[in-house]
Image (cartoon, rainbow, N blue to C red):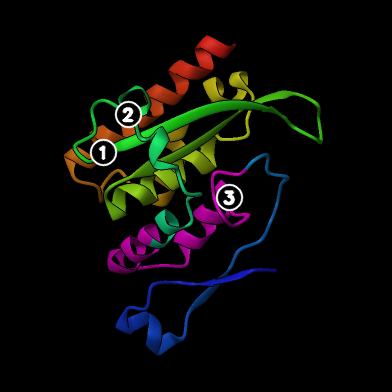
Amino acid sequence: MPVCALAATPRLRQEQATLEFRNHEVHVASALKSDLNIEDIIENFSFLEEWEDRYGYLIELGRELTELPEAERIEANKVQGCVSQVWLLPSSDENPSTGERVLVFNGASDAHIVSGLVAITLALFSGKTAQTILKTDEQETFKAIGLEEHLTPQRSNGLRSMVKRIKDIAAAAA
């Protein structure tokens, strides 16, 4: 099982905290370097009581994004409505377990915390069928993590813009 240490804050160093990331599902062309899925991310957030530590984990998640080549950081892939620059690159693939066609997203941002939000969003939606994406209640997930009350209005708007873009792509693919 891979183990990922969180960004070392004084409190975490004292506790020598590390989180085990378990692989609960098969990932198709994962947008993240590790096998983290959304359930793991929610569970890992639940271990962190202070928002300073949660922001550190959010930054670590952003570092887990698969690199988006500069050639893909173009206006057509840019998410409108984000203060920071965010790019989403959709593709489709076949889930080897089910044979179903799934949407796969890769993404990047020029800001550390927003990169973490991209990672959470991709963990929630990437590798899922268009119908599953459209039925997903992202607000439930964001509430479980506690994002609603801890993001600035600009970041919240950007997060909504990312989700809208992904759901628009899913609707077109359905």
- In depth, the one of 4 and 94 nearer the eye is 94
Q: Report the predominant secondary structure element of the magenta stretch.
A: helix
Numbered disc 2: secondary structure: loop
Label 1 crowd bin: few (<14), some (14–19), many (20+), radius 10 Å: some
Q: So how many labels did they put on this image?
A: 3
Residue drawn 38% across and 43% down? Answer: 108
Q: The disc labelled 3 sits on which kind of residue?
A: Glu
**In this figure, which residue is indicated by the disc labeled 1?**
85
Horizontal and vertical percent position of residue 56: 34, 65
Earlier-in-chain disc, 3 versus 2: 3
Q: The disc labelled 2 sits on which kind of residue?
A: Lys
**In this figure, which residue is indicated by the disc labeled 2?**
78
- In depth, the one of 75 and 5 nearer the eye is 75
Q: Quadrant of the N terminus?
A: bottom right
| Left or right of residue 123: residue 88 | left
> The magenta stretch spans which residues?
30-59
| Residue 39 numbered mark, or none | 3
Q: Quadrant of residue 72?
A: top left
Q: The disc labelled 1 sits on which kind of residue?
A: Gln
* Residues at circles 3 and 2 in contact by the CB criterion of under 8 Å: no
* Residues at circles 2 and 1 in contact by the CB criterion of under 8 Å: yes
Compute the Cα span from label 2 to label 1.
7 Å
Residue drawn 54% across and 50% down? Answer: 32
Does residue 142 appear in this view?
no
Residue drawn 23% across and 27% down? Answer: 81
Q: Is residue 56 above or below residue 150?
A: below
